[in-house]
Image: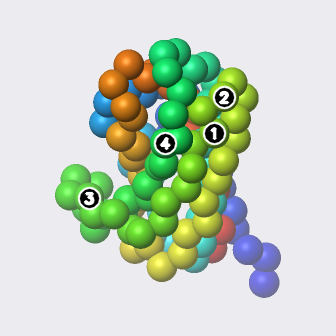
Amino acid sequence: MLRESHTAVVGRNEVWEGSAASEPYEAGWALEAIVWLRVLAVEGPTANVEARVQLSPDGIHWVDEGTRFAISAVKDGLTFARVSHFGNWLRVVADLPAGMKLTVLVSITVKG
């Protein structure tokens, strides 16, 4: 059996500051996902910052899935997280310290 896969860009050239979130992605058909976060530009102070994967039954109400990963807060920094057993909707969120701005590219690769 040939597995189906798809990559969705859920945040392109988005400026994240304060509390930020990617667009949600409906992936209920998939068995596993890799969430990619690439930093295109950094403004302000750099700090150790984490992103969190969230899931939702309806794309409106969100809860932390439990997966956290460090954001590489340097130009062209790339990080990822693997997720499984996530239900239907996925997104990535982060809380950045005051004065920090990141321009990001967020993608979700799913396989069924």
Residue 23's image quarter?
top left
Q: Residue at x 73, y 74 (%)?
A: 3
- The image shows residue 22, relative to residue 88, as above or below, that is above
Q: Residue furthest top?
A: 43
Disc 1 marks a residue whose amino acid type is Ser
Residue 86's image quarter?
bottom left
Mark 3–mark 4 Cα distance, whole angstroms, equals 20 Å
Percent of width and height locating residue 77: 70, 35
Q: Earlier in the sequence, mark 2 or mark 3?
A: 3
Disc 4 marks a residue whose amino acid type is Val
Mark 3–mark 1 Cα distance, whole angstroms, equals 24 Å
Q: Which of marks 4 and 2 is nearer the N terminus?
A: 4
Q: Name the element at disc 4.
A: strand
The circle on residue 62 is 3
Disc 3 marks a residue whose amino acid type is Trp
Percent of width and height locating residue 41: 61, 19
Which residue position holds label 4? 49
Q: Are marks 2 and 1 in contact (CB under 8 Å)?
A: yes
Q: Is residue 52 visible?
A: yes
Which residue position holds label 2? 74
Label 2: few (<14), some (14–19) or many (≥20) C-alpha neighbours in 10 Å: some
Point out the frontmost of discs 2 and 3. 2
Q: Do the residues labelled 3 and 4 touch (CB within 8 Å)?
A: no
Point out the frontmost of discs 3 and 1. 1
Label 1: few (<14), some (14–19) or many (≥20) C-alpha neighbours in 10 Å: some
Mark 1–mark 4 Cα distance, whole angstroms, equals 8 Å
Which residue position holds label 1? 72
